[in-house]
Structures are given as C-alpha cells and as structure tokens.
Image: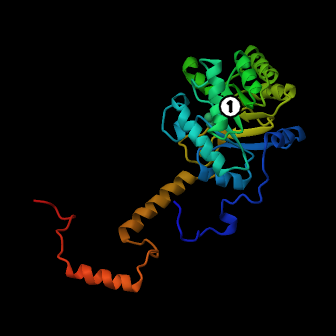
C-alpha cells in the first residue's frame, strides 16, 4: 500500500525500469529474425509487472490462467472476460515499456466472429493490450483475418489448447502422430496467411516445432514446445515456485511460496509480541497534552473486550 515512509529497498532492488529498453512488436520480430531469443512470462497485476519489466522480460502475457492462479478456478474456461480486461490494463500500467499480450478467454471469440473482434477491441482500448492471443486451429483463419483487418495484432495459440480440455478429456499434448503433426504445421501456415503477428505453440514435440519455426515468417513462442522457438513463455507462478506442481519445462527458479509462508509466520509472531517497528504517526506536544487533559477527565466506558452478561 502507498506509504509516506521512505522505501527500504536500495536502488538496485527497486522495480524501477529506467534502464530497461522499450519492447514493441517490431523489436520482438527483430530479435526473432536476428536469432536473439525473447522471454515471456504470465503476469496478472501492476506491481508484479513493474518488477518483471525492471528485470527486462520482453513480453508479458495476461493469461486466462489468471482464472486458476488468481481466482482459484479448476480450469481456464471459467476466467471471466471483464476480469481479464481489467487485469490487462493493470499489467500495462505497471509495465508501460513492455509488450503486453492479452489472452482472450473461453467464449469471448468462439461463438461469433463479430463478437470476437469487438471483444479483442476491448482488450486493446480498455485493456491497453498491445496484442491479443486466441487458442485456434485453421478453422479460425477468417476470424484472425478480420482482427488483423481491424488493426488488432493477434498471437495464434496452436497445438494443445487448454480451452478444449473438456473435449479431449483433459489437458493433452499436440502433434504426437505424423498426421496430427502435419495438421499442426498446416494450422501454423493458415494463421500466418490469415495475418497473425505471432504464433504460440503449446505442448508439442520438438520436431514439429522445428518445422513450424522453419516455415514461419513471424515469431514463434513456445510453451512446452522445445528450445527451437524464438521466444518462450511459462506461468510466472510456476517459475516462482508458488504452484503445487509445475510441468517439466517450467521448473521453478525460486521458492517464493515458501518465502511467503515464512514471512507470514514472522508477521504472526511480530503481531503477537507487539513488534511493529517505529510508529510513524506522532501527535504534536500541545495536541497530545490537550488530548490527555480531556481523556483523563472523561469517565471510562465499559471495555468492549470483556465478555457480556
Ligand atoms: O493462459 C496462459 O497462461 C497461457 C500460457 C500458459 C501459454 O496461455
């Protein structure tokens, strides 16, 4: 919360992004062309976005995983549209120099193309997004073309599509047979032809991703799709060690969950012992004297902490 007390963080530990270069869709495409891999993480709030921008993360994804991570739903299909639009704007306010990708949630684009384009537009205007992501196959090419025509950059998320998990009886990997691998490469081609600005391939074998990267004229982000991709994305809470389970390609680099637990235990002890640090709010002497003069004369009220009856 905002406080007038000076921050205890030293300059090198603040979330200041002054020295961080601005990323744009163009700069990311340039990195991909030049063989410099870019890093993407999910992010769901402005404060975390500030830290991730300060670290130099190139792209932030406000994923529909917010429904699981932030709201505690069992899968991403429950993530509400308005909620994601609001989170996206918060992330962009926290990381104004970083490309922010908004995930279009289940049923915000599947039922009707016009509704999909309008909802994508909301992410761009209300949500301040730089690009939107849809889980698609080649049958969505007309929708992607309509979005591109409207000036909305699209990340085409192909391969494993968590919004289809119910249809597949759970989360699944894509392209594990020759036929489905060829179909996945066709999906990629169709999305490029439709005008997508980037591809995101989730949960696919390395050979399939390699072929997609080989044929692609746009940056390819991988999520469990092997190291060939131009960029990589994982869920931030997996990286931070805050989830109970992480996929093998998203092993934690920190144990923030454990640190939260330790900090919270420490706070419980400090509250119990009254160790709250230096109290910052002080009455001027004359005001204190007047306050004490009046209160010491007024009759005591019955204690509210004593049991009644
Ligand atoms: O919503 C999300 O977090 C995602 C990534 C895991 C790719 O779509």
Q: Nearer the viewer, residue 235 or 180?
A: 235
Residue 173 image position (x, y, % from top left): 66, 25
Q: Residues within 10 Å of mark 1 (few under 14, many from 20)?
A: many
Residue 19: name its quadrant.
Answer: bottom right
**Measuring 57% from the left and 37% from the top, which residue is drawn there?**
84
Question: Would residue 273 appear left or right of 146 to someone viewing this image?
Answer: left
- Relative vertical location of residue 162 with respect to residue 113 in this rendering, above or below: below
**Measuring 62% from the left and 38% from the top, which residue is drawn there?**
126
Residue 83 image position (x, y, % from top left): 53, 37
Which residue is the site of mark 1? 133
Q: Nearer the viewer, residue 176 or 39?
A: 39
Q: Find numbered disc 1 in the image and state the secondary structure of the residue it sits on.
A: strand
**Measuring 21% from the left and 64% from the top, which residue is drawn there?**
304
Where ligand 1 lies, by quadrant?
Answer: top right
- Relative vertical location of residue 42 with respect to residue 303 in this rendering, above or below: above
Question: Would residue 39 appear left or right of 29 to someone viewing this image?
Answer: left
**Direction right: furthest residue:** 34
Give the total number of marks visible in the rendering: 1
User: From the image, which quarter does the C terminus lie in?
Assistant: bottom left
Beta carbon at label 1 within 8 Å of ligand 1: yes
Please indicate, yes or no, whether residue 150 appears anywhere in the rendered image. Answer: yes
Residue 27: name its quadrant.
Answer: top right
Residue 39: name its quadrant.
Answer: top right
Residue 155 image position (x, y, % from top left): 73, 31
Q: Nearer the viewer, residue 94 or 306?
A: 94
């Amino acid at each position: 919360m905002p406080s007038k007390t000076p921050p205890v963080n030293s300059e090198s530990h603040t979330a200041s992004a002054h020295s961080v270069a601005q990323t744009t869709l163009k700069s990311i495409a340039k990195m991909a062309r030049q063989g410099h891999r870019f890093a993407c993480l999910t992010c769901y709030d402005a404060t975390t976005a500030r830290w991730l921008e300060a670290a130099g993360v190139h792209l932030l994804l406000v994923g529909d995983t917010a429904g699981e991570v932030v709201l505690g739903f069992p899968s991403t299909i429950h993530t509400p549209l308005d909620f994601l639009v609001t989170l996206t704007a918060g992330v962009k306010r926290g990381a104004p120099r970083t490309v922010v990708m908004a995930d279009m949630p289940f049923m915000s684009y599947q039922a009707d193309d016009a509704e999909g384009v309008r909802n994508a537009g909301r992410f761009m205007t209300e949500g301040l997004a730089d690009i939107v992501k849809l889980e698609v196959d080649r049958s969505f090419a007309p929708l992607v073309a309509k979005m591109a025509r409207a000036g909305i950059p699209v990340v085409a998320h192909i391969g494993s599509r968590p919004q289809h998990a119910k249809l597949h009886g759970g989360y699944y990997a894509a392209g594990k047979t020759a036929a489905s691998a060829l179909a996945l490469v066709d999906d990629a081609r169709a999305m490029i032809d439709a005008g997508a600005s980037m591809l995101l391939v989730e949960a696919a074998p390395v050979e399939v991703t390699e072929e997609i990267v080989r044929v692609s004229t746009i940056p390819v982000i991988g999520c469990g799709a092997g190291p060939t991709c131009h960029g990589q994305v994982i869920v931030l809470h997996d990286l931070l060690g805050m989830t109970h389970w992480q996929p093998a390609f998203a092993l934690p680099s920190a144990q923030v969950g454990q640190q939260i637990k330790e900090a919270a235990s420490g706070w419980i002890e400090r509250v119990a012992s009254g160790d709250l640090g230096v109290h910052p709010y002080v009455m001027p002497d004359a005001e204190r004297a007047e306050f004490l003069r009046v209160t010491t004369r007024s009759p005591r009220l019955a204690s509210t902490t004593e049991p009644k009856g």
